């Protein structure tokens, strides 16, 4: 018998106060809005051996694309070593989500960053999905010609789902 995967909505889970979240930037909320996502196993990570930008991380460490379920599982099960103030980086097809622990308020801050050449400091962690990983292309992140057809289709399907979820929230006034 097939077990049913639990699903969540961003608007219900990724809010300040849930999962020890202390702050979420507007880019994250705007991009994901009411996206639905499935639970996932705990992702794995590698530490950056030196300061690296996204292109170097992609070519040297080869993380897979993460999903929102990877971040949610991490928030609820983060090892103590990940609560040291260094960036915990989750790569998506178009951006990076940085989840950072702030010891002062003992909460997570969730930031979404464009891939713009930013250098991440040595000691930051790059996460990969535990299962079902889609490896990043060895070329520059974000350029559609560097992604496989399968990855581009998956990215489009994800975006269509996000837009569909957004469209369901629109109320059209009667004339």
Image: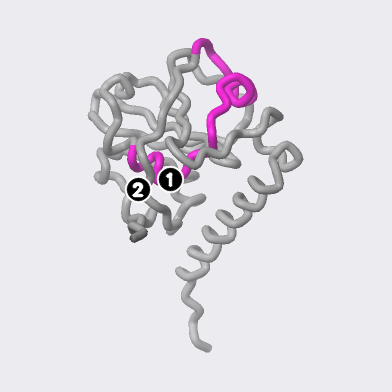
Mark with earlier residue (1, 2): 2
Residue of label 1: 68
Q: Which mark is residue 14?
A: 2
Q: Which mark is residue 128?
A: none
Q: Which residues are magenta?
A: 49-73
The answer to whether residue 9 is seen in the rendering is yes
Kindly report the distance in space between the C-alpha atoms of the residues bearing marks 1 and 2. 10 Å
Q: Residue at x 24, y 24 (%)?
A: 104
* Residue 57 position in % (x across, y down): 58, 22
> Magenta segment: does it hold 52?
yes
* Residue 22 position in % (x across, y down): 29, 38
Q: Residue at x 49, y 81 (%)?
A: 173
Residue 156, compared with residue 96, is above or below; it is below
Q: How packed is label 1: few (under 14 Cα within 10 Å), some, or many (20 or more)?
A: many
Circle 1 — which element? helix
* Residue 49 position in % (x across, y down): 50, 11
The answer to whether residue 118 is seen in the rendering is no
The total of numbered circles placed on residues is 2
Residue 103, compared with residue 33, is above or below; it is above
Farthest residue, direction front:
1
Horizontally, residue 124 falls left or right of residue 20, namely right
* Residues at discs 1 and 2 in contact (Cβ within 8 Å): yes
* Residue 54 position in % (x across, y down): 60, 26
Circle 2 — which element? loop
> Magenta segment: does it hold 116?
no
**Residue 87 or 62: which is nearer the viewer?**
62
Horizontally, residue 102 falls left or right of residue 51, namely left
């Amino acid at each position: 018998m097939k077990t049913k995967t639990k699903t969540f909505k961003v608007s219900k889970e990724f809010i300040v106060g849930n999962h020890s979240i202390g702050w979420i930037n507007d880019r994250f909320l705007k991009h994901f809005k009411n996206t639905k996502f499935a639970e996932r196993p705990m992702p794995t990570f590698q530490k950056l051996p030196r300061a690296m930008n996204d292109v170097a991380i992609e070519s040297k460490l080869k993380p897979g694309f993460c999903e929102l379920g990877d971040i949610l599982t991490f928030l609820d099960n983060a090892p103590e070593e990940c609560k040291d103030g260094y960036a915990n980086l989750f790569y998506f097809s178009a951006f990076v989500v940085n989840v950072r622990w702030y010891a002062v308020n003992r909460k997570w801050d969730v930031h979404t960053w464009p891939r713009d050449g930013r250098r991440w400091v040595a000691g930051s962690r790059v996460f990969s999905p535990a299962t079902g990983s889609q490896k990043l292309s060895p070329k520059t992140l974000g350029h559609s010609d560097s992604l496989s057809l399968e990855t581009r289709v998956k990215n489009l399907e994800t975006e269509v789902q996000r837009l569909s979820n957004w469209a369901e929230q629109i109320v059209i006034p009667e004339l």
